[in-house]
Image (cartoon, rainbow, N blue to C red):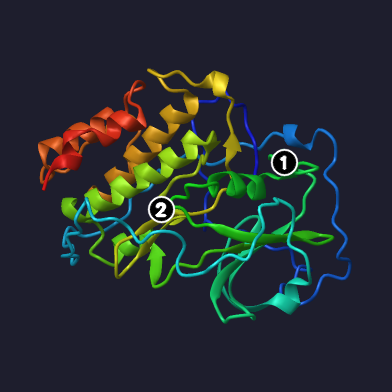
Amino acid sequence: MTRTTDPADPEPSSVSGPSSLQLTPDSDPTSPDPDPEPMDPQPGASNHELPPHTDLVDSQPMNVSRQSSLKMTPDLKQEPVPGPSGLHSELTSLPGPAVGSFFSLYDVGVSLGSGNFGTVYEGTRRSDGQKVAIKFLTKSVQDCFIYVPGSIRPLLGEVALNLVVREPPQSPNIVQMYEWFEQHHRYILILEYPHPCETLLSFTLSNGGYLEETVARGLMHQAVLAAKHCLDRRVFHRDIKSDNILVNTETLQLKLIDFGCGKLFETSDYDEYTGCPAVKATVKSLGVLLFRMVNGISFVEIQMIPSSTLSSECCDLLNQCKSSSLTLDKLLEHEWFRKS
């Protein structure tokens, strides 16, 4: 579910808990919706304000050891696996909901995760047996809606943002939405299901609590490319963190997930040299992400002290991510990414 805040707000907010969403008790995903007629959004719904979230910075550090068991050293220049994870979409170019009964097209499997707004399940497309992720979102009066080209009415914000970021050329570092359904009391999103994978948080913890720079460099590079793909399309993700990122445990391909807190920002807010509040907040979030990958502890807002074992280039990049003038293009040009 997408929430909105003041577009001028330079600070992103992190939604605590799992990155997926929570269903209400009466929203059993295994039961067909009793009323399949879609509900039109209410006028002015896009102006709803999101209640304050927990700050992006965690107050409690993770207690981890400095013994990383991860020895993989991916080549930064290696091209990620192109496109979605083997699932060929059968969609048309229209942004409207899919036609047909959801339960005649998909089987719902085990729960993959849940949060405040809904639940994500493993699913199978009946036509060809392909695995997908199925996200159930319960409708709410706080839903926001966004117009996208080709739509006769505004769409649920999370649906709209997924449609925007999947416009060609697609990013191999963002989980794609293949189609979506609207029922009387909920929305259903059919998403790419990369496997084998785990969240970046779990991946880091399972490898000793922190990652070697060679591994972190490849993952960070992909995370920056994913964020840049979003911002180039005026999409402000607003919740880039380690449990909103999936890592393929075999290829180390990274994919950004969950646009439930995202929003569109105005082109008038963007400046070629200084970026905009969305760019600045995204750079800071990426700095937090890198700090946690290579240090294994939480980011400290006021005084970020990198480990003495880090390279000088990595420490410099971490410090520059706190700068208000660093853009994603400049970040990608940093010398740390050129190290072998």
Residue type beneath disc 1:
Cys
Instruction: Specify few, some or many for label 2: CA neighbours under 10 Å numbering under 14, 14-19, or 20 or more.
Output: many
Q: Nearer the viewer, residue 142 or 234?
A: 234
Residue marked by disc 2: 173
Q: Amino acid at mark 2?
A: Asn
Q: Position of residue 184 (x, y in %)?
A: 84, 60
Q: Residue furthest toward the front?
A: 92
Q: Position of residue 38 (x, y in %)?
A: 85, 56
Mark 1–mark 2 Cα distance, whole angstroms, equals 26 Å
Element type where label 1 sits in the image: loop
For this rendering, which residue is in front, 277 or 150? 150
Residue name at image x 71 percent, y 72 percent: 29
| Dot label at residue 144 | 1
Q: Position of residue 24 (x, y in %)?
A: 74, 63
Above or below residue 313? Residue 182 is below
Q: Residue at x 19, y 65 (%)?
A: 70
- On the rendered structure, is 303 left or right of 100? left
